[in-house]
Image (tube, grey):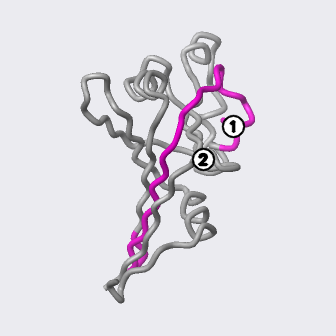
Amino acid sequence: MDENRRRLSRDESIALLARPVTGVFSTLHEAGWIHSVPVHFRYAGGEILVLAEAAAVKSRNAVRSGHATLCVDVTDGPVRSYVSVSGPVTTRRPPPMADLVALDEKYGRDDFAGGWDADDLAAALLLVLRAERWIAWADWD
């Protein structure tokens, strides 16, 4: 094994997921190609929570296939770390307000929980990825 590379512990992986960074959410389209998009997310109790429009490609793919992957990578000086989690996906519709408030708190914003009208909220959902498969590494120069 490379001396400048190591696996991240579960606690280190969760700490990385707690940072206010975007992740790349990947799903499989019915035609067989991978659809990957940056998302704001929250890790809570073994689940990755992603706010999305119900009609979005990522939502349709995740609902249809029932699976997704989220990958987050960060660079701190010479250290590069990443966490990739995969697993089954369910939805919560409408998105619970407590989850929207928690997204606001994580990212220092106020627009996840605020500014919704009834039509907007009806068109939204929370994608819930249960993190079953973890891959997490750090490497450095």
Quadrant of the rendering where the C terminus is positioned: bottom left
- Against 75, residue 114 (above or below) is above
Across and down, in percent, residue 104 comes to 64, 43
Residue count near mark 1 (Cα–Cα under 10 Å), binned few <14, some 14–19, many ≥20: some
Closer to the camera, 23 or 119? 23
Q: Decide which of 98, 2 is in the foreground and name it.
A: 2
Question: In the displayed structure, would residue 63 be above or below residue 41?
Answer: above
Query: Does residue 97 appear to the left or right of 135 in the view shown?
Result: right
Mark 1, residue position: 99
Looking at the image, tell me whether mark 1 or mark 2 is earlier in sequence order: 2
- The answer to whether 18 is drawn above or below residue 47 in the figure is below
In the depicted structure, whether residue 46 falls above or below residue 26 = below
User: Residue lying farthest top?
Assistant: 119
Element assignment for label 2: strand
Q: Which mark is residue 122?
A: none
Instruction: Classify 10 Å Cα crowding around label 2: few (below 14), some (14-19), many (20 and above).
Output: many
Q: Are marks 1 and 2 in contact (CB under 8 Å)?
A: yes
Query: Is residue 93 located in the magenta-colored stretch of the structure?
Result: yes
| The N terminus, quarter of image | bottom left
- Marks 1/2: CA distance? 8 Å
Identify the residue at image location x=60%, y=26%: 91
* Lateral position of residue 18 relative to residue 37, left or right: right
- Residue picked out by circle 2: 42
Residue 60, quarter of the rendered image: top left
- Of residues 110 and 97, the one nearer the viewer is 97
Magenta-highlighted residues: 75-102
- Tell me where residue 86 appears, x and y as whole percent: 48, 47
Q: Position of residue 22 (x, y in %)?
A: 45, 50
Task: Give the residue type that dot 2 points to.
Answer: Arg
